[in-house]
Image (cartoon, rainbow, N blue to C red):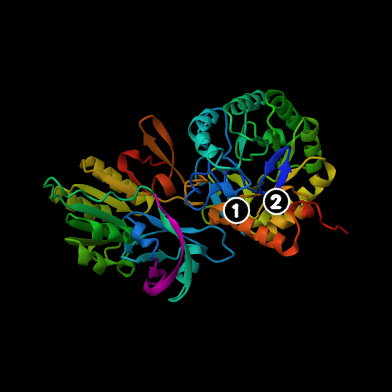
Amino acid sequence: MACVLEQCPILYRSELRPGVVDMVLGAPRIAPLCSPGQFVHIKCSPDLLLRRPISLCDVEQDTIRLVIESVGKGSQWLCERQAGELLDLLGPLGDHGFPVPDAAQGDSRPLLLVGGGVGSAPLLYCAKSSPVPVDAALGFGSAGAVILERDFARCCRSVTVSTDDGSYGFAGFVTGAAQQLLEKEAYRAVYACGNMTMLRAVAELTQRLDVPCYLSLDERMGCGLGACLVCAVKVRGEDGEHYSHVCKQGPVYRREEVVFE
Amino acid sequence: MSRLGVTIAGVPFKNPVTVASGTFGFGREFAPFYDLSRLGGIVVKGLTPAPREGNRPPRIAETPLGILNSVGLQNPGVEAFVRDELPFLRGFDTNIIANITGATPQEYADMCQTLSSAGGVDMIEINVSCPNVKEGGALFGASASGISSVVSACRKATSLPLIVKLSPNVTDIVEMAKAAHQAGADCLSLINTLLGMRIDTVTRRPILGNNMGGLSGPAVKPVAVRMVYQVARAVPLPVIGMGGISTADDAVEFLLAGATAVSVGTANLVNPMAAVEVLEGLRDRLDSTGESVCDIIGAVIPY
Protein backbone atom coordinates (compact mmCIF):
# COMPACT_ATOMS: atom_id res chain seq x y z
CA MET A 1 0.00 0.00 0.00
CA ALA A 2 1.07 3.52 -0.70
CA CYS A 3 2.84 5.52 1.96
CA VAL A 4 4.87 8.71 1.75
CA LEU A 5 7.20 10.94 3.74
CA GLU A 6 5.68 14.33 4.44
CA GLN A 7 6.59 17.37 6.51
CA CYS A 8 3.33 18.25 8.21
CA PRO A 9 2.52 21.52 9.97
CA ILE A 10 0.57 21.39 13.22
CA LEU A 11 -2.56 23.41 12.39
CA TYR A 12 -4.30 23.00 15.71
CA ARG A 13 -3.27 21.75 19.12
CA SER A 14 -5.11 21.44 22.39
CA GLU A 15 -4.88 19.42 25.55
CA LEU A 16 -7.74 16.97 26.06
CA ARG A 17 -6.56 16.38 29.61
CA PRO A 18 -3.16 16.65 31.28
CA GLY A 19 -0.78 14.43 29.32
CA VAL A 20 -3.07 13.88 26.33
CA VAL A 21 -2.78 16.15 23.32
CA ASP A 22 -5.14 16.49 20.38
CA MET A 23 -3.56 17.79 17.17
CA VAL A 24 -4.59 18.35 13.58
CA LEU A 25 -1.83 18.26 11.00
CA GLY A 26 -1.80 19.51 7.44
CA ALA A 27 -1.09 16.35 5.43
CA PRO A 28 -2.32 16.81 1.86
CA ARG A 29 -0.22 13.89 0.60
CA ILE A 30 -0.85 11.42 3.41
CA ALA A 31 -4.53 12.13 4.13
CA PRO A 32 -5.98 10.85 0.82
CA LEU A 33 -4.17 7.52 1.28
CA CYS A 34 -5.53 6.75 4.75
CA SER A 35 -8.08 4.24 5.98
CA PRO A 36 -9.36 3.50 9.52
CA GLY A 37 -7.00 1.61 11.81
CA GLN A 38 -3.85 2.80 10.06
CA PHE A 39 -1.13 4.87 11.71
CA VAL A 40 1.61 7.37 10.95
CA HIS A 41 5.24 7.03 12.06
CA ILE A 42 6.60 10.31 13.45
CA LYS A 43 10.19 11.44 13.92
CA CYS A 44 10.68 12.90 17.37
CA SER A 45 13.49 14.97 18.85
CA PRO A 46 16.95 14.74 17.23
CA ASP A 47 18.30 12.80 20.20
CA LEU A 48 15.66 10.08 19.79
CA LEU A 49 16.46 7.78 16.91
CA LEU A 50 13.27 5.85 16.31
CA ARG A 51 10.02 7.21 14.96
CA ARG A 52 6.91 6.75 17.09
CA PRO A 53 3.79 5.09 15.66
CA ILE A 54 0.61 7.09 16.30
CA SER A 55 -2.84 5.87 15.21
CA LEU A 56 -5.04 8.03 13.02
CA CYS A 57 -7.88 9.47 15.09
CA ASP A 58 -9.58 11.14 12.17
CA VAL A 59 -8.83 12.11 8.60
CA GLU A 60 -10.33 14.91 6.52
CA GLN A 61 -9.58 15.82 2.92
CA ASP A 62 -6.08 17.15 3.56
CA THR A 63 -5.65 16.95 7.31
CA ILE A 64 -5.14 14.21 9.84
CA ARG A 65 -6.01 14.28 13.51
CA LEU A 66 -3.92 12.55 16.16
CA VAL A 67 -4.50 12.06 19.88
CA ILE A 68 -1.21 11.45 21.67
CA GLU A 69 -0.67 10.40 25.27
CA SER A 70 2.63 11.30 26.90
CA VAL A 71 3.89 7.91 28.07
CA GLY A 72 7.60 8.05 27.22
CA LYS A 73 10.31 10.33 25.88
CA GLY A 74 9.05 10.29 22.28
CA SER A 75 5.40 10.87 23.00
CA GLN A 76 6.31 13.50 25.59
CA TRP A 77 8.29 15.39 22.95
CA LEU A 78 5.37 15.12 20.52
CA CYS A 79 2.93 16.37 23.15
CA GLU A 80 5.11 19.44 23.72
CA ARG A 81 4.95 20.54 20.04
CA GLN A 82 2.94 23.67 19.32
CA ALA A 83 0.77 24.87 16.45
CA GLY A 84 2.92 26.06 13.56
CA GLU A 85 5.72 23.54 14.09
CA LEU A 86 6.48 20.91 11.45
CA LEU A 87 6.49 17.17 12.11
CA ASP A 88 8.25 14.59 9.93
CA LEU A 89 5.67 11.91 9.14
CA LEU A 90 5.86 8.58 7.33
CA GLY A 91 2.51 7.11 6.46
CA PRO A 92 -0.09 5.92 6.33
CA LEU A 93 1.22 2.56 7.54
CA GLY A 94 -0.38 -0.77 8.38
CA ASP A 95 -1.76 -2.72 5.43
CA HIS A 96 -4.54 -4.16 7.57
CA GLY A 97 -6.68 -1.63 9.37
CA PHE A 98 -10.26 -2.06 10.53
CA PRO A 99 -12.46 -3.40 7.72
CA VAL A 100 -15.07 -0.88 6.60
CA PRO A 101 -18.42 -2.61 7.25
CA ASP A 102 -20.28 -3.69 4.12
CA ALA A 103 -23.76 -2.17 4.22
CA ALA A 104 -24.89 -4.10 1.14
CA GLN A 105 -27.34 -7.00 1.13
CA GLY A 106 -29.64 -5.29 3.58
CA ASP A 107 -27.55 -6.18 6.64
CA SER A 108 -28.21 -3.21 8.86
CA ARG A 109 -26.82 -4.70 12.08
CA PRO A 110 -24.78 -2.11 13.94
CA LEU A 111 -21.07 -2.14 14.70
CA LEU A 112 -19.75 -1.97 18.25
CA LEU A 113 -16.53 -0.12 18.98
CA VAL A 114 -14.77 -0.87 22.27
CA GLY A 115 -11.99 1.50 23.31
CA GLY A 116 -9.71 1.57 26.33
CA GLY A 117 -8.27 4.95 27.33
CA VAL A 118 -6.36 6.67 24.54
CA GLY A 119 -6.95 3.48 22.54
CA SER A 120 -10.38 4.95 21.90
CA ALA A 121 -8.90 7.52 19.52
CA PRO A 122 -8.42 5.33 16.40
CA LEU A 123 -12.00 4.08 16.75
CA LEU A 124 -13.33 7.57 16.07
CA TYR A 125 -12.06 7.29 12.49
CA CYS A 126 -13.92 3.94 12.22
CA ALA A 127 -17.10 5.48 13.55
CA LYS A 128 -16.95 8.38 11.11
CA SER A 129 -16.24 6.08 8.15
CA SER A 130 -18.89 3.51 8.92
CA PRO A 131 -21.87 3.17 6.53
CA VAL A 132 -23.77 1.27 9.22
CA PRO A 133 -24.93 2.48 12.65
CA VAL A 134 -22.23 2.47 15.30
CA ASP A 135 -22.35 2.15 19.08
CA ALA A 136 -19.27 2.95 21.13
CA ALA A 137 -18.24 1.68 24.56
CA LEU A 138 -15.30 3.68 25.84
CA GLY A 139 -13.52 2.82 29.06
CA PHE A 140 -11.36 5.05 31.24
CA GLY A 141 -9.82 4.92 34.71
CA SER A 142 -11.89 7.73 36.17
CA ALA A 143 -14.04 10.73 35.20
CA GLY A 144 -10.99 12.95 34.75
CA ALA A 145 -9.50 10.63 32.15
CA VAL A 146 -12.48 10.62 29.78
CA ILE A 147 -11.70 11.94 26.30
CA LEU A 148 -13.48 12.26 22.96
CA GLU A 149 -16.96 11.53 24.34
CA ARG A 150 -18.56 14.37 22.39
CA ASP A 151 -16.70 13.47 19.21
CA PHE A 152 -18.09 9.94 19.34
CA ALA A 153 -21.55 11.23 20.26
CA ARG A 154 -21.63 13.24 17.03
CA CYS A 155 -21.17 10.20 14.78
CA CYS A 156 -22.43 7.25 16.83
CA ARG A 157 -25.94 6.01 17.51
CA SER A 158 -25.01 5.64 21.18
CA VAL A 159 -21.95 6.16 23.37
CA THR A 160 -21.47 4.36 26.67
CA VAL A 161 -18.62 5.66 28.79
CA SER A 162 -17.37 3.48 31.62
CA THR A 163 -14.95 4.28 34.41
CA ASP A 164 -13.08 1.69 36.42
CA ASP A 165 -13.68 3.60 39.66
CA GLY A 166 -17.30 4.35 38.89
CA SER A 167 -16.81 8.12 39.03
CA TYR A 168 -18.58 8.62 35.69
CA GLY A 169 -20.96 6.63 33.51
CA PHE A 170 -21.05 2.84 33.70
CA ALA A 171 -19.18 1.67 36.82
CA GLY A 172 -16.61 -1.00 35.96
CA PHE A 173 -14.48 -2.18 33.09
CA VAL A 174 -15.46 -1.36 29.52
CA THR A 175 -15.98 -5.04 28.79
CA GLY A 176 -18.86 -4.95 31.29
CA ALA A 177 -20.47 -2.11 29.37
CA ALA A 178 -19.82 -3.90 26.09
CA GLN A 179 -21.37 -7.10 27.40
CA GLN A 180 -24.61 -5.29 28.29
CA LEU A 181 -24.83 -3.91 24.75
CA LEU A 182 -23.98 -7.23 23.10
CA GLU A 183 -26.61 -9.09 25.12
CA LYS A 184 -29.29 -6.59 24.14
CA GLU A 185 -28.78 -6.55 20.39
CA ALA A 186 -27.16 -8.45 17.52
CA TYR A 187 -24.02 -6.64 16.36
CA ARG A 188 -22.27 -7.42 13.09
CA ALA A 189 -18.83 -7.11 14.69
CA VAL A 190 -16.79 -5.60 17.51
CA TYR A 191 -13.72 -3.46 16.81
CA ALA A 192 -11.42 -2.91 19.78
CA CYS A 193 -8.34 -0.91 20.65
CA GLY A 194 -6.69 -0.64 24.04
CA ASN A 195 -4.16 -2.41 26.23
CA MET A 196 -3.57 -6.17 25.94
CA THR A 197 -5.48 -6.99 29.14
CA MET A 198 -8.54 -5.22 27.78
CA LEU A 199 -8.15 -6.74 24.32
CA ARG A 200 -7.93 -10.22 25.79
CA ALA A 201 -11.14 -9.60 27.77
CA VAL A 202 -12.90 -8.32 24.63
CA ALA A 203 -11.68 -11.35 22.68
CA GLU A 204 -13.01 -13.73 25.33
CA LEU A 205 -16.33 -11.89 25.55
CA THR A 206 -16.95 -11.83 21.81
CA GLN A 207 -15.92 -15.45 21.46
CA ARG A 208 -18.39 -16.46 24.16
CA LEU A 209 -21.15 -14.47 22.48
CA ASP A 210 -20.06 -15.57 19.00
CA VAL A 211 -19.64 -12.08 17.54
CA PRO A 212 -16.86 -11.38 15.01
CA CYS A 213 -14.11 -9.26 16.54
CA TYR A 214 -11.12 -7.27 15.28
CA LEU A 215 -8.32 -6.10 17.56
CA SER A 216 -5.74 -3.37 16.99
CA LEU A 217 -2.37 -4.48 18.36
CA ASP A 218 0.73 -2.60 19.40
CA GLU A 219 4.40 -3.62 19.67
CA ARG A 220 7.71 -1.79 19.90
CA MET A 221 8.40 -0.80 16.32
CA GLY A 222 11.36 -0.02 14.07
CA CYS A 223 11.04 0.95 10.41
CA GLY A 224 7.24 0.77 10.19
CA LEU A 225 7.56 -0.62 6.67
CA GLY A 226 7.91 -4.35 7.29
CA ALA A 227 11.65 -4.47 6.63
CA CYS A 228 13.31 -4.72 10.04
CA LEU A 229 10.94 -7.34 11.53
CA VAL A 230 11.13 -6.09 15.11
CA CYS A 231 7.41 -5.46 15.84
CA ALA A 232 6.56 -9.14 16.05
CA VAL A 233 3.33 -10.49 17.53
CA LYS A 234 2.43 -14.15 17.66
CA VAL A 235 -0.54 -15.06 15.49
CA ARG A 236 -2.34 -18.28 14.65
CA GLY A 237 -2.52 -19.11 10.96
CA GLU A 238 -3.68 -22.08 8.92
CA ASP A 239 -0.31 -23.75 9.41
CA GLY A 240 0.18 -23.05 13.11
CA GLU A 241 1.55 -20.14 15.09
CA HIS A 242 4.03 -17.68 13.65
CA TYR A 243 5.25 -14.13 14.15
CA SER A 244 3.45 -11.42 12.25
CA HIS A 245 4.62 -7.82 12.06
CA VAL A 246 2.23 -5.20 13.37
CA CYS A 247 3.54 -2.44 11.11
CA LYS A 248 2.82 -4.24 7.85
CA GLN A 249 0.54 -7.26 8.38
CA GLY A 250 -1.35 -5.37 11.14
CA PRO A 251 -2.05 -3.44 13.15
CA VAL A 252 -5.55 -4.95 13.12
CA TYR A 253 -6.06 -8.71 13.46
CA ARG A 254 -9.09 -10.99 13.66
CA ARG A 255 -9.65 -12.30 17.18
CA GLU A 256 -9.04 -15.87 16.00
CA GLU A 257 -5.55 -14.92 14.83
CA VAL A 258 -4.28 -13.32 18.03
CA VAL A 259 -2.27 -15.47 20.44
CA PHE A 260 -2.43 -13.96 23.93
CA GLU A 261 0.73 -14.90 25.82
CA MET B 1 34.95 4.59 -13.91
CA SER B 2 33.01 7.47 -12.48
CA ARG B 3 34.13 9.50 -9.52
CA LEU B 4 31.94 7.37 -7.26
CA GLY B 5 32.83 3.94 -8.60
CA VAL B 6 34.84 1.35 -6.68
CA THR B 7 35.77 -2.28 -7.31
CA ILE B 8 35.59 -4.89 -4.59
CA ALA B 9 36.98 -8.38 -5.22
CA GLY B 10 36.61 -7.82 -8.94
CA VAL B 11 32.99 -6.70 -8.64
CA PRO B 12 32.34 -3.17 -9.90
CA PHE B 13 30.19 -0.95 -7.67
CA LYS B 14 28.71 2.16 -9.33
CA ASN B 15 29.07 3.87 -5.98
CA PRO B 16 30.31 2.85 -2.52
CA VAL B 17 26.94 3.14 -0.77
CA THR B 18 25.24 -0.12 0.14
CA VAL B 19 22.54 -1.02 2.63
CA ALA B 20 23.25 -3.30 5.58
CA SER B 21 21.74 -6.70 6.13
CA GLY B 22 18.66 -6.79 8.32
CA THR B 23 17.76 -3.16 7.86
CA PHE B 24 16.45 -3.34 4.31
CA GLY B 25 14.49 -6.62 4.10
CA PHE B 26 14.74 -7.85 0.52
CA GLY B 27 14.35 -4.33 -0.82
CA ARG B 28 10.63 -4.39 -1.52
CA GLU B 29 9.70 -2.02 1.30
CA PHE B 30 12.07 0.66 0.03
CA ALA B 31 11.33 0.40 -3.69
CA PRO B 32 8.35 2.82 -3.41
CA PHE B 33 10.71 5.50 -2.07
CA TYR B 34 13.50 5.42 -4.66
CA ASP B 35 14.94 3.41 -7.54
CA LEU B 36 17.00 0.69 -5.87
CA SER B 37 19.33 0.76 -8.89
CA ARG B 38 20.79 3.94 -7.42
CA LEU B 39 22.49 1.91 -4.69
CA GLY B 40 25.96 0.46 -5.00
CA GLY B 41 24.68 -2.76 -3.52
CA ILE B 42 21.94 -4.35 -1.45
CA VAL B 43 22.87 -6.72 1.35
CA VAL B 44 19.73 -8.72 1.95
CA LYS B 45 18.20 -9.84 5.24
CA GLY B 46 20.24 -12.65 6.83
CA LEU B 47 19.37 -16.06 5.42
CA THR B 48 19.48 -19.47 7.07
CA PRO B 49 19.08 -22.94 5.52
CA ALA B 50 15.52 -23.34 6.86
CA PRO B 51 12.93 -20.67 7.64
CA ARG B 52 13.29 -19.09 11.08
CA GLU B 53 10.61 -17.43 13.17
CA GLY B 54 13.03 -15.30 15.16
CA ASN B 55 13.07 -14.41 18.85
CA ARG B 56 10.23 -13.56 21.20
CA PRO B 57 9.28 -9.88 21.30
CA PRO B 58 9.97 -7.18 22.24
CA ARG B 59 12.79 -7.15 19.72
CA ILE B 60 13.82 -3.51 19.81
CA ALA B 61 14.79 -1.00 22.48
CA GLU B 62 15.95 2.55 22.01
CA THR B 63 19.22 3.63 23.62
CA PRO B 64 21.05 6.98 23.57
CA LEU B 65 21.48 7.52 19.81
CA GLY B 66 21.22 3.83 19.17
CA ILE B 67 18.98 0.83 19.14
CA LEU B 68 19.23 -2.67 20.53
CA ASN B 69 17.64 -5.40 18.43
CA SER B 70 17.09 -9.08 19.01
CA VAL B 71 15.25 -10.13 15.86
CA GLY B 72 17.07 -13.48 15.79
CA LEU B 73 17.39 -13.92 12.04
CA GLN B 74 13.70 -14.24 11.21
CA ASN B 75 13.73 -15.14 7.51
CA PRO B 76 11.98 -17.41 5.02
CA GLY B 77 15.04 -19.60 4.39
CA VAL B 78 17.50 -19.58 1.51
CA GLU B 79 15.31 -21.52 -0.91
CA ALA B 80 12.32 -19.24 -0.47
CA PHE B 81 14.68 -16.28 -0.97
CA VAL B 82 15.90 -17.69 -4.28
CA ARG B 83 12.36 -18.50 -5.40
CA ASP B 84 10.38 -15.50 -4.13
CA GLU B 85 12.76 -12.58 -3.62
CA LEU B 86 15.74 -12.93 -5.93
CA PRO B 87 13.70 -12.49 -9.15
CA PHE B 88 12.50 -9.12 -7.82
CA LEU B 89 16.03 -8.05 -6.87
CA ARG B 90 17.44 -9.13 -10.23
CA GLY B 91 15.31 -6.40 -11.78
CA PHE B 92 17.59 -3.71 -10.37
CA ASP B 93 20.98 -2.63 -11.67
CA THR B 94 22.82 -3.00 -8.39
CA ASN B 95 24.97 -5.64 -6.69
CA ILE B 96 22.99 -8.22 -4.76
CA ILE B 97 24.83 -9.51 -1.72
CA ALA B 98 23.30 -12.49 0.08
CA ASN B 99 23.97 -12.64 3.82
CA ILE B 100 24.09 -16.16 5.28
CA THR B 101 24.23 -17.79 8.71
CA GLY B 102 24.43 -21.50 9.43
CA ALA B 103 24.69 -23.68 12.51
CA THR B 104 27.66 -25.61 11.08
CA PRO B 105 30.36 -24.90 8.46
CA GLN B 106 28.59 -27.44 6.23
CA GLU B 107 25.34 -25.46 6.40
CA TYR B 108 27.19 -22.32 5.35
CA ALA B 109 28.80 -24.22 2.47
CA ASP B 110 25.47 -25.67 1.33
CA MET B 111 23.92 -22.21 1.26
CA CYS B 112 26.86 -20.92 -0.79
CA GLN B 113 26.18 -23.62 -3.36
CA THR B 114 22.46 -22.89 -3.48
CA LEU B 115 23.09 -19.17 -3.94
CA SER B 116 25.85 -19.65 -6.53
CA SER B 117 23.70 -21.85 -8.72
CA ALA B 118 20.68 -19.57 -8.38
CA GLY B 119 22.28 -16.86 -10.52
CA GLY B 120 21.87 -13.16 -9.85
CA VAL B 121 23.76 -13.12 -6.55
CA ASP B 122 26.91 -11.03 -6.96
CA MET B 123 28.59 -11.71 -3.64
CA ILE B 124 27.99 -13.68 -0.46
CA GLU B 125 28.37 -12.13 2.96
CA ILE B 126 29.19 -14.72 5.63
CA ASN B 127 27.62 -13.72 8.91
CA VAL B 128 29.74 -15.06 11.74
CA SER B 129 28.64 -12.30 14.04
CA CYS B 130 24.89 -12.38 14.72
CA PRO B 131 24.61 -11.96 18.51
CA ASN B 132 20.97 -13.03 18.62
CA VAL B 133 21.03 -16.73 17.78
CA LYS B 134 22.18 -19.60 19.97
CA GLU B 135 23.73 -21.76 17.28
CA GLY B 136 26.28 -20.60 14.75
CA GLY B 137 26.48 -16.88 14.11
CA ALA B 138 28.65 -15.14 16.67
CA LEU B 139 29.80 -18.48 18.03
CA PHE B 140 32.01 -18.85 14.96
CA GLY B 141 32.95 -15.18 14.86
CA ALA B 142 34.26 -15.23 18.41
CA SER B 143 37.39 -17.19 17.54
CA ALA B 144 39.92 -17.28 14.72
CA SER B 145 39.49 -21.04 14.40
CA GLY B 146 35.71 -20.69 14.16
CA ILE B 147 36.02 -18.09 11.40
CA SER B 148 38.56 -20.23 9.64
CA SER B 149 36.35 -23.31 9.63
CA VAL B 150 33.35 -21.48 8.19
CA VAL B 151 35.21 -19.43 5.59
CA SER B 152 37.25 -22.43 4.40
CA ALA B 153 34.06 -24.46 3.92
CA CYS B 154 32.43 -21.63 1.97
CA ARG B 155 35.55 -21.06 -0.13
CA LYS B 156 35.40 -24.66 -1.35
CA ALA B 157 31.68 -24.37 -2.10
CA THR B 158 31.57 -21.29 -4.30
CA SER B 159 33.58 -19.14 -6.66
CA LEU B 160 31.48 -16.07 -5.81
CA PRO B 161 33.38 -13.38 -3.89
CA LEU B 162 33.09 -13.94 -0.15
CA ILE B 163 32.63 -11.12 2.33
CA VAL B 164 33.14 -12.02 5.98
CA LYS B 165 31.12 -9.90 8.39
CA LEU B 166 33.08 -9.51 11.58
CA SER B 167 31.80 -9.19 15.12
CA PRO B 168 33.03 -6.33 17.29
CA ASN B 169 32.48 -8.52 20.35
CA VAL B 170 36.02 -9.90 20.28
CA THR B 171 39.26 -9.13 22.06
CA ASP B 172 41.25 -8.51 18.88
CA ILE B 173 39.39 -7.66 15.68
CA VAL B 174 42.62 -7.78 13.63
CA GLU B 175 43.21 -11.40 14.61
CA MET B 176 39.73 -12.27 13.31
CA ALA B 177 40.28 -10.33 10.11
CA LYS B 178 43.54 -12.16 9.47
CA ALA B 179 41.87 -15.51 10.06
CA ALA B 180 39.19 -14.65 7.50
CA HIS B 181 41.82 -13.53 5.02
CA GLN B 182 43.90 -16.67 5.41
CA ALA B 183 40.83 -18.87 5.00
CA GLY B 184 40.07 -17.32 1.62
CA ALA B 185 37.84 -14.30 2.22
CA ASP B 186 37.79 -11.68 -0.57
CA CYS B 187 36.46 -8.82 1.53
CA LEU B 188 35.61 -7.96 5.13
CA SER B 189 32.59 -6.10 6.41
CA LEU B 190 32.43 -4.56 9.85
CA ILE B 191 31.03 -4.00 12.29
CA ASN B 192 28.05 -6.15 13.22
CA THR B 193 26.22 -5.06 16.36
CA LEU B 194 27.74 -4.77 19.81
CA LEU B 195 26.13 -7.03 22.39
CA GLY B 196 24.12 -4.93 24.83
CA MET B 197 21.24 -4.89 27.26
CA ARG B 198 18.56 -2.62 28.70
CA ILE B 199 16.52 -3.15 31.83
CA ASP B 200 13.17 -1.59 32.76
CA THR B 201 13.86 -0.24 36.22
CA VAL B 202 10.21 -0.41 37.29
CA THR B 203 9.40 -3.97 36.22
CA ARG B 204 13.04 -5.08 36.65
CA ARG B 205 12.68 -7.01 33.41
CA PRO B 206 14.96 -6.72 30.39
CA ILE B 207 13.27 -4.68 27.66
CA LEU B 208 14.17 -7.23 25.01
CA GLY B 209 12.40 -10.58 25.04
CA ASN B 210 15.77 -12.17 24.35
CA ASN B 211 17.25 -10.32 27.38
CA MET B 212 20.24 -9.14 25.33
CA GLY B 213 20.55 -7.75 21.83
CA GLY B 214 22.79 -6.04 19.31
CA LEU B 215 23.52 -2.33 19.61
CA SER B 216 23.66 -0.26 16.42
CA GLY B 217 23.18 3.31 15.27
CA PRO B 218 25.23 6.49 15.74
CA ALA B 219 26.17 5.37 19.26
CA VAL B 220 28.50 2.67 17.87
CA LYS B 221 30.10 4.73 15.12
CA PRO B 222 33.40 5.60 16.85
CA VAL B 223 33.93 1.93 17.72
CA ALA B 224 33.20 0.95 14.12
CA VAL B 225 35.51 3.61 12.64
CA ARG B 226 38.31 2.48 14.96
CA MET B 227 37.89 -1.17 13.99
CA VAL B 228 37.76 -0.38 10.26
CA TYR B 229 40.92 1.67 10.70
CA GLN B 230 42.72 -1.16 12.49
CA VAL B 231 41.59 -3.87 10.07
CA ALA B 232 42.18 -1.91 6.86
CA ARG B 233 45.79 -1.26 7.85
CA ALA B 234 46.50 -4.83 8.93
CA VAL B 235 44.86 -6.95 6.25
CA PRO B 236 45.23 -6.63 2.45
CA LEU B 237 41.51 -7.02 1.74
CA PRO B 238 38.90 -4.42 0.88
CA VAL B 239 36.65 -3.44 3.78
CA ILE B 240 32.98 -2.50 3.75
CA GLY B 241 32.54 -0.21 6.73
CA MET B 242 29.37 0.21 8.71
CA GLY B 243 28.11 1.21 12.12
CA GLY B 244 25.96 4.29 12.64
CA ILE B 245 26.24 5.84 9.19
CA SER B 246 23.39 8.27 8.58
CA THR B 247 25.06 11.16 6.74
CA ALA B 248 27.60 11.62 3.95
CA ASP B 249 30.05 12.90 6.53
CA ASP B 250 29.75 9.63 8.43
CA ALA B 251 30.43 7.75 5.19
CA VAL B 252 33.51 9.87 4.47
CA GLU B 253 34.81 9.10 7.96
CA PHE B 254 34.67 5.36 7.21
CA LEU B 255 36.27 5.82 3.78
CA LEU B 256 39.10 7.83 5.33
CA ALA B 257 39.56 5.09 7.93
CA GLY B 258 40.16 2.66 5.09
CA ALA B 259 36.79 1.34 3.97
CA THR B 260 36.35 0.86 0.20
CA ALA B 261 32.57 0.97 0.55
CA VAL B 262 30.06 1.65 3.29
CA SER B 263 26.72 0.30 4.44
CA VAL B 264 23.82 2.34 5.74
CA GLY B 265 21.98 0.28 8.35
CA THR B 266 19.99 1.56 11.30
CA ALA B 267 19.38 4.87 9.51
CA ASN B 268 17.11 3.00 7.06
CA LEU B 269 14.76 2.35 9.97
CA VAL B 270 14.51 6.04 10.73
CA ASN B 271 14.48 7.53 7.26
CA PRO B 272 13.65 5.33 4.27
CA MET B 273 15.62 7.76 2.08
CA ALA B 274 18.76 7.56 4.24
CA ALA B 275 20.97 5.58 1.85
CA VAL B 276 20.34 7.79 -1.18
CA GLU B 277 20.73 10.90 0.95
CA VAL B 278 24.16 9.61 2.02
CA LEU B 279 24.95 8.93 -1.63
CA GLU B 280 23.84 12.38 -2.81
CA GLY B 281 25.78 14.04 -0.01
CA LEU B 282 28.88 12.07 -0.91
CA ARG B 283 28.53 13.01 -4.58
CA ASP B 284 28.20 16.71 -3.70
CA ARG B 285 31.18 16.52 -1.43
CA LEU B 286 33.41 14.85 -4.04
CA ASP B 287 32.20 17.28 -6.70
CA SER B 288 33.23 20.19 -4.49
CA THR B 289 36.74 18.85 -3.89
CA GLY B 290 37.23 17.34 -7.34
CA GLU B 291 38.27 14.03 -5.80
CA SER B 292 37.02 10.53 -6.48
CA VAL B 293 36.09 7.98 -3.84
CA CYS B 294 39.33 6.09 -4.45
CA ASP B 295 41.29 9.23 -3.52
CA ILE B 296 39.89 9.30 -0.01
CA ILE B 297 39.93 5.58 0.86
CA GLY B 298 42.35 5.22 3.76
CA ALA B 299 43.41 8.86 3.40
CA VAL B 300 43.26 9.56 7.13
CA ILE B 301 46.43 11.27 8.29
CA PRO B 302 47.15 9.65 11.65
CA TYR B 303 49.39 11.21 14.28
Region in magenta = A1-27
Can residue A90 be spotted in the picture?
Answer: yes
Which quadrant is the C terminus of chain B positioned in? bottom right
Instruction: Provide the residue designation for mark 1.
Output: B275
Left or right: B74 in relation to B289: left
Viewer-nearest of discs 2 and 1:
2
Provide residue B225's location: percent of width, then percent of height. 74, 53
Are dots 2 and 1 in contact, CB under 8 Å? no
Tell which subunit mark 1 falls on.
B
Q: Residue furthest right?
A: B303
- Residue type at mark 1? Ala
Q: Does B157 sit above or below residue B132?
A: above
Secondary structure at badge 2 equals loop
Confirm whether the magenta stretch covers residue A205. no
User: Marks 2 and 1, how far apart in space?
Assistant: 19 Å
Q: Is residue A15 magenta?
A: yes
Give the residue pinned by disc 2.
Answer: B2
**Residue in front for this viewpoint, B156 or A98:** B156
